[in-house]
Image (tube, rainbow, N blue to C red):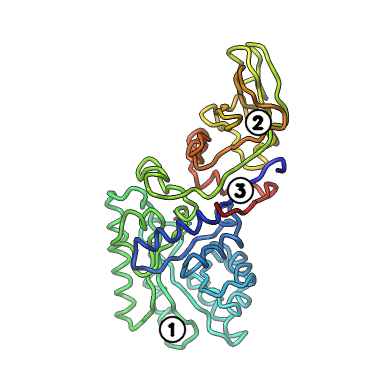
């Protein structure tokens, strides 16, 4: 094994995809943005398709293009495309584009005309999150859109929106967003604008709000076996999901220290007794959160060893305990599914004041991804 690696269990990806397919009548769009939440765009994308995904989705167009060029033939939607992107290539490769402004609509129409091919388009509606999507400009947007549809300048495939609070299923805002969504869909149909797909559900809504499924659900964090919200919705285990990433590293050094030794930058932690310390050859340059505290750590030689002191750029120190049999060169599990006693992604998230999404997505490019099927 190298210094550090992230083992990606592709069987878990397949299991998590098949699980949600069994829970819905909607098509499933596997969200593989941000390098498949750090799990690897191409390998995960192909595994999701093999397991039955109907769509793939990315934020960035460049990821959509990479997927298509890697031989993916199912529909791909890329939804975060500022003005000036390479829309001609996107249209040529039949990548569905999302539009939330008149400016973007005009630019995509022009790109389509330039290559004599009709762009496939989804309109994003802001139904209350105040992030992407057409919001209060709706009444200005509608006539421009109508004109483009009538003139067959675009092929309107779908209309979509995004929940702000899907991880709090009993919040009234979810219902309000659905009502607003349905109202705008009606508006469109009233104007004679037809399209096949409506989608609004992310993982949390896919799991907890079947009224929101429409005819596509966007399955993101759940695909990777992680819970959209550990506190409100329960853990991976509670939800029947299999975490797909196991992060491993090696102990660069094991050493004995006396009680009272300050550890790491700032000596923010001091040993409480004579103990053995292990230096793990990973740091914040690899995506280990700098502010993770002793509530996280590694699993080594059959035991948990908590972090002691601050995480550095390329290394962090764990307290192995005086009786540990760990040695220089021992392999450690930084996080995994927890089944062998190792820390979970959720524990690392909690220890650093973050969420599981951020922990896996930030595992850096210098950590090789190793694919397995367990
Ligand atoms: C990231 C994202 C998703 C997936 O969200 P999860 O909570 O990971 O399921 C769905 N839709 C859009 C637009 C997104 O950006």
Between circles 3 and 1, the one closer to the viewer is 3
CA neighbours of label 1 inside 10 A, class few (<14), some (14 to 19), many (20+): some
Q: Secondary structure at mark 1?
A: helix
Q: In which quadrant of the rendered image does the N terminus lie? A: top right
Disc 3: residue Cβ within 8 A of ligand 1's nearest atom: no
Identify which residue, 218 or 104, lies in the foreground: 218
* Local crowd size for mark 2, using a 10 Å CA cut-off: few (<14), some (14–19), many (≥20): many
Going by the image, does 329 lie left or right of 242? right
How many angstroms separate mark 1 from mark 2 (CA)?
57 Å
Where residue 129 sits: x, y (%)? 39, 56
* Marking on residue 316: 2
CA–CA distance in space, label 3 to label 2: 20 Å
Residue drawn 64% across and 70% down? 70
Q: Is residue 115 above or below residue 205?
A: below
- Compared to residue 198, the image places residue 201 above or below, namely above
Res 137 visible: no
- Residue receiving disc 1: 149
Query: Up-down: is 345 above or below 321?
Result: below
**Helix, strand or loop at mark 2:** strand
Q: Earlier in the sequence, mark 3 or mark 2?
A: 3
Residue under pointer 3: 7
- Residue 11 appears in the rendering: yes
Helix, strand or loop status at disc 3: strand
* Labels 1 and 2: the sequence-earlier one: 1
The mark nearer the N terminus, 3 or 1, is 3
Which residue is pictured at 41% across the width and 55% down the height? Answer: 203
Q: Position of residue 275 (x, y in %)?
A: 63, 16
Q: Is residue 255 left or right of residue 29?
A: right
């Amino acid at each position: 094994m190298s210094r550090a690696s992230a083992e990606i269990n592709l069987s878990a990806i397949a299991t998590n995809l098949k699980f949600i397919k069994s829970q819905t009548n909607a098509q499933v769009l596997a969200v593989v943005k941000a390098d498949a939440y750090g799990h690897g765009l191409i390998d995960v994308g192909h595994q999701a398709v093999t397991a039955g995904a109907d769509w793939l989705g990315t934020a960035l167009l460049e990821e959509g293009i990479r997927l298509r060029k890697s031989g993916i033939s199912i529909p791909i939607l890329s939804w975060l495309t500022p003005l000036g992107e390479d829309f001609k290539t996107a249209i040529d490769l039949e990548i569905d584009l999302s539009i939330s402004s008149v400016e973007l609509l005009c630019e995509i129409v022009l790109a389509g005309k330039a290559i004599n091919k009709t762009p496939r388009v989804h309109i994003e509606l802001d139904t209350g999150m105040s992030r992407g999507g057409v919001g209060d400009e709706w009444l200005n947007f509608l006539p421009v859109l109508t004109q483009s549809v009538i003139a067959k300048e675009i092929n309107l495939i779908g209309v979509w929106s995004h929940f702000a609070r899907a991880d709090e299923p009993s919040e009234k805002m979810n219902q309000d967003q659905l009502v607003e969504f349905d109202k705008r869909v009606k508006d469109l149909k009233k104007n004679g604008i037809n399209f096949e797909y409506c989608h609004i559900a992310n993982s949390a809504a896919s799991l907890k709000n079947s009224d929101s499924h429409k005819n596509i659900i966007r399955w993101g964090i759940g695909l990777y076996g992680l819970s959209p919200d550990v506190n409100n919705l329960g853990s991976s285990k509670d939800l029947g999901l299999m975490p797909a990433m196991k992060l491993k590293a090696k102990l660069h050094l094991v050493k004995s220290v006396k009680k009272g030794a300050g550890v790491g930058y700032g000596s923010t932690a001091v040993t409480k007794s004579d103990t053995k310390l292990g230096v793990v050859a990973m740091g914040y340059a690899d995506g280990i959160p700098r502010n993770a505290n002793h509530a996280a750590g590694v699993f080594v030689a059959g035991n948990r060893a908590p972090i002691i002191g601050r995480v550095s750029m390329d290394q962090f120190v764990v307290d192995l305990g005086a009786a540990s049999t760990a040695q220089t060169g021992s392999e450690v599990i930084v996080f995994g599914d927890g089944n062998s006693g190792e820390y979970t992604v959720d524990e690392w998230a909690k220890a650093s004041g973050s969420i599981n999404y951020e922990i896996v997505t930030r595992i850096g490019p210098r950590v090789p991804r190793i694919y397995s099927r367990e």
